[in-house]
Amino acid sequence: MAAGKGTRLKSKHPKVLHEVGGKPILAHVIATAQKVVPAQDIFVIIGHEAERVREAVAGTGVNFVLQAAQRGTGHALMVAREALLGNGTKYDQVIVLSGDAPLITAETIRKLSDFHTAQKATMTLLSADLDDPYGYGRVLRKGGRVEVQAIVEEKAATPQQKKIREINSGFYAFDVAALYEHVNRLSTENAHGEYYLTDMAAMFHRARKKVVAIKTSDGSEVLGSNTRTEMMVLDARLRLAKCRELLENGVTIFYPHTCVIDSDVEVGADTVIEPFVQLLGSTKIGADCRIRSYSVIGNSVIGDRVTVKPGTIMEDSRVSAGAVIGPYSHLRPGSDVGEGAHVGNFVETKKIKLGKGSKANHLSYLGDAEIGEGVNIGAGTITCNYDGVNKHKTVIEDGVFIGSDSTLVAPVRIGRGAYVAAASCITEDVPADALALGRARQSVKEGWARVKRDTQKEKHR
Ligand code: UD1
Ligand code: CA
């Protein structure tokens, strides 16, 4: 169920697209569901901002059911009748997941489903004991029995019922045929004027059908995200869990509370992550690397034994083994740094290939360039890749030496082993092994400064 608006967030974005652990809440739930059943058997109920939600998770291959007007969790299941029941032979059992509870695990979903089957129940709900059950539906059981009589929502609960710590998690298993035999009898006579799926418990109970609950051993798994505060709690949990996973896999992380590491990030053993590092999106980092403080690395692939010095920003880039990046390098999308290459301070790169062992150590802009192996890019080198309308390419072949403060006006090619003299403005191709000078010749006026000083002294006398 992912059709709700998320009124309590006070947001223009649909609730399930808010991010925790670096990806949409709904993406977490779908990824977990996919560990239990194949994508073609997953139906995501969308409604509020349906197209945005669909687009965000369409890549997973799941199906969608449109709940055009969101009239409650019971109504969400009503609109899924065709998808789940069809002509009556499609599915026996449906597992209902809350699209806003991202910490659920595949193991717990399987337990819920297996318990439902073993109990031959009509409805099985996943419950949890929470220290602070406020806001959740409470589970009413007769004595200590597995059978459930009803679920009562926070707003309708009596002071006595509010003391119950066993809450309804919003995850259920249903017998599909029984669900669709009864679901249309739900009413909207409640605090929100909605069809509550939770009312199915009492309805089945009255019809003498078996309703049971299975409790999670870890209550935090079912935490929902109705408010930004709840999301903050989930985000912190996910990120700390991610750090623990990496630590267990041989990664050192100093002060993990200061690091932001997204759920899908991978890091190799013996890599050290210093405080205040962000590793985002689909970033993959090899073994034996050191990622120093204040680096922000998004959707990038870094090989083994790479050093990323402090303050480096990297997006959609690739860095091969043994390279050294930073401090304060900015690798923009499409940067591909070769084995053992160096990119130093205040060097900005975009859409470039920097060959094996090449160095650009200081204060440069390298964009739309193909740079060979063993190239030395002097301090202050700039590829002039943009003529105001189009982008052009700079090619620098193997073994080239570019003197400091040179501008390379693209399209231009510097041949293998050539030298470009410092402060040159290169507008034409340089052949292999040549020296190119593109600057005015220096002129010297002997004694000029002394004369100037002397005349100034005269004036002041
Ligand atoms: C629901 C349960 C509550 C339980 C809690 C657990 C009901 C009436 N209450 O409350 O007992 O303790 O979950 O987190 O079900 N949705 C739709 N269509 C709708 C309305 C909601 O798809 O018309 C989706 C929402 O996007 C959300 C999920 O269903 O992902 C749950 O809805 P929400 O409004 O968050 O229910 P809660 O108030 O949290
Ligand atoms: Ca909720």
Image (tube, rainbow, N blue to C red):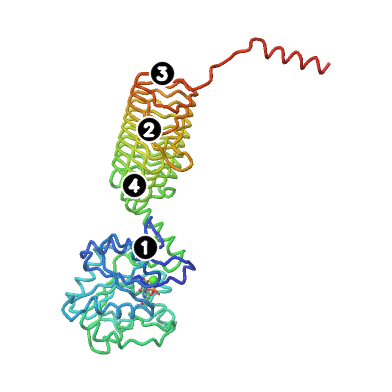
Dot 1 crowding, Cα within 10 Å, few <14, some 14–19, many 20+? many
Q: Contact, CB < 8 Å: mark 3 with mark 2? A: no
Q: Is residue 82 left or right of residue 417?
A: left
For label 2, being within 8 Å of ligand 1 is answered no
Pointer 3: what residue? Answer: 435
Q: Residue at x 43, y 70 (%)?
A: 6
Distance between mark 3 and mark 1 Cα atoms: 58 Å
Spot occupied by residue 245 in the image (x, y as percentages of width and height): 31, 50
Q: Secondary structure at mark 2?
A: strand
Q: Earlier in the sequence, mark 3 or mark 1?
A: 1
Where on the picture, by quarter, is residue 36?
Answer: bottom left
Amino acid on which disc 1 is placed: Ile
Distance between mark 4 and mark 2 Cα atoms: 17 Å
Q: Secondary structure at mark 4?
A: loop
Q: Earlier in the sequence, mark 4 or mark 2?
A: 4
Q: Secondary structure at mark 3?
A: strand
Dot 2 crowding, Cα within 10 Å, few <14, some 14–19, many 20+? many
Pointer 2: what residue? Answer: 324
Pointer 1: what residue? Answer: 25
Q: Secondary structure at mark 1?
A: helix
